[in-house]
């Protein structure tokens, strides 16, 4: 106990070992759904579901442990929602790349993130991007997740005449998905720890009873990770056609991480008197190292989770909270049979709920300034309608730069915005699709 006290500075942060353990368990319960959802999404890209399950648990454990030990923050990491969907439905199925190449792009973006985390330019990069685009891109990723959720639930189906249409709302699986979503939101409103995972398991059990899915067991030895371990194609990812993808992975991870770190730290009272986060470099390094490690293990981008706020609300203030969460992710390795028993209609409510949470970014746009909210809405709407986060980012930058320039307010956009806008235009001209 004394070693934990000295290493994490528990007394200085006004906390105890018991409080930190409870907070760590709370954080794990709020984000444990990722060990069920992530393998299902990446399996659609052709990856081995069992191996991805192991990679998900290990990447989350490694990233969270590094955050705990190197930065001493109660922040947990895991493969990011939205980025895993972009990996599968955008980079692999949408652009026709192999999942090995997609993993290579994640790895390269992680290496660049490591370099940026070490160099002092990281603050300049973060500050160079307009707040409206940051908020809109987060919301757009939410909308992207939303359409995937509705598709998995059978609510949205393809229609030759209208592109999309309404599915069979009387189908058992669709009804279960709807009820699961309502239950999930209600449990969250009642502040029940683990609301998302409780709803997922509840829907799965009812589906099994109705014969809509099969039960594969609960506990077993961890499956092999070999089908995905070190399978990334780095050379393939460095082709010119993938540069936009690498940038998209990097951009979303960098700004999502920065926003999550600041937001969660603010709730925990960990910011200094000037509103800055101490040990920011260590925190960003933990995130970037987790992305590199995750790509090597066989999963999409690993990032900091806003769900860490649940543990902070439970009293977590130091890295001991994160360390407890990391240990629980390791224990999760033994629940592979349960993970493979979870059907898509049971995880669809979780995707939609996360989509609703992320859509809040639209409320933070400056709705009094047309040159701010229009590019933001363009970026957000383009993501689900082109089924690509990268396209949404590109449209956002191009429209922001063009509108500021043509409206006689060029000085309100940083040079970085104009450079990126030009690069995106060139990409659309010479590397379409």
Image (cartoon, rainbow, N blue to C red):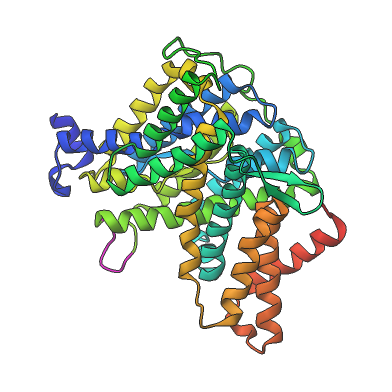
Q: With 45 as the anchor, is 279 left or right in this view?
A: left
- At x 22%, y 33%, the residue is 21
Please name the predominant secondary structure of the magenta segment in the image.
Answer: loop
Residue toward you, 147 or 229 = 147
Which region of the structure is painted magenta?
270-275
Say if residue 253 shows up in the picture: yes
Say if residue 108 shows up in the picture: no
Residue furthest to the front in view is 170
Which quarter of the image is occupied by the N terminus? top left
Residue toward you, 122 or 371 = 371
Q: Image quarter for residue 49?
A: top right
Indicate whether residue 389 is drawn in magenta: no
Q: With 411 as the anchor, is 74 left or right in this view?
A: left
From the top left corner, tell me how far across and down residue 331 is, in percent.
Answer: 37, 20
From the top left corner, tell me how far across and down residue 429 is, in percent.
Answer: 86, 62
Q: Image quarter for residue 38?
A: top right
Against 420, residue 309 (above or below) is above
Indicate whether residue 271 is drawn in magenta: yes
Residue furthest to the top in view is 221
- At x 43%, y 40%, the residue is 77
From the top left corner, tell me how far across and down residue 10 is, in percent.
Answer: 17, 42
From the top left corner, tell me how far across and down residue 93 is, in percent.
Answer: 74, 38
């Amino acid at each position: 106990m004394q070693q934990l006290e000295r290493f994490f500075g528990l007394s200085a942060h006004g906390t105890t070992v018991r409080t930190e353990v409870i907070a760590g368990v709370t954080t794990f319960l709020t984000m444990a759904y990722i060990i069920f959802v992530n393998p299902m999404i990446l399996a659609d890209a052709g990856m081995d579901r069992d191996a991805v399950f192991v990679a998900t648990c290990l990447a989350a454990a490694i990233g969270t442990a590094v955050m705990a030990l190197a930065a001493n923050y109660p922040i947990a990491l895991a493969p990011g929602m939205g980025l895993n969907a972009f990996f599968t439905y955008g980079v692999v199925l949408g652009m026709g790349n192999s999942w090995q190449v997609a993993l290579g792009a994640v790895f390269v973006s992680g290496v660049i993130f490591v370099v940026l985390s070490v160099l002092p330019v990281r603050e300049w990069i973060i500050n160079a991007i307009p707040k409206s685009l940051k908020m809109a891109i987060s919301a757009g990723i939410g909308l992207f997740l939303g359409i995937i959720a509705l598709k998995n639930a059978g609510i949205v189906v393809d229609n030759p005449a209208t592109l999309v249409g309404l599915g069979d709302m009387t189908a058992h699986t669709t009804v279960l998905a709807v009820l699961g979503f309502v239950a999930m939101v209600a449990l969250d409103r009642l502040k029940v720890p683990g609301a998302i995972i409780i709803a997922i398991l509840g829907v799965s059990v009812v589906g099994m009873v109705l014969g809509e899915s099969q039960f594969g067991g609960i506990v077993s030895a961890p499956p092999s990770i070999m089908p995905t371990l070190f399978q990334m194609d780095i050379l393939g990812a460095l082709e010119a056609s993938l540069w936009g993808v690498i940038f998209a992975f990097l951009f979303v991870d960098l700004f999502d991480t920065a926003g999550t770190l600041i937001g969660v730290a603010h709730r925990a009272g960990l910011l200094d008197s000037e509103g800055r986060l101490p040990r920011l470099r260590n925190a960003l390094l933990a995130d970037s190292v987790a992305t590199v490690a995750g790509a090597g293990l066989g999963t999409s981008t690993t990032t900091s989770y806003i769900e860490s706020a649940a543990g902070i609300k439970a009293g977590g203030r130091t890295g001991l909270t994160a360390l407890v969460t990391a240990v629980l992710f390791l224990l999760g390795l033994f629940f592979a049979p349960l993970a493979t028993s979870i059907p898509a209609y049971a995880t669809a409510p979780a995707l939609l709920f996360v989509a609703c949470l992320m859509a809040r970014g639209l409320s933070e746009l400056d709705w009094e300034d047309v040159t701010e909210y229009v590019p933001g809405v363009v970026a957000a709407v383009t993501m689900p309608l082109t089924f690509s986060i990268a396209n949404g980012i590109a449209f956002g930058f191009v429209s922001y730069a063009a509108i500021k320039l043509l409206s006689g307010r060029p000085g309100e956009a940083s040079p970085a915005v104009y450079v990126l806008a030009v690069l995106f235009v060139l990409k659309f001209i010479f590397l379409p699709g």
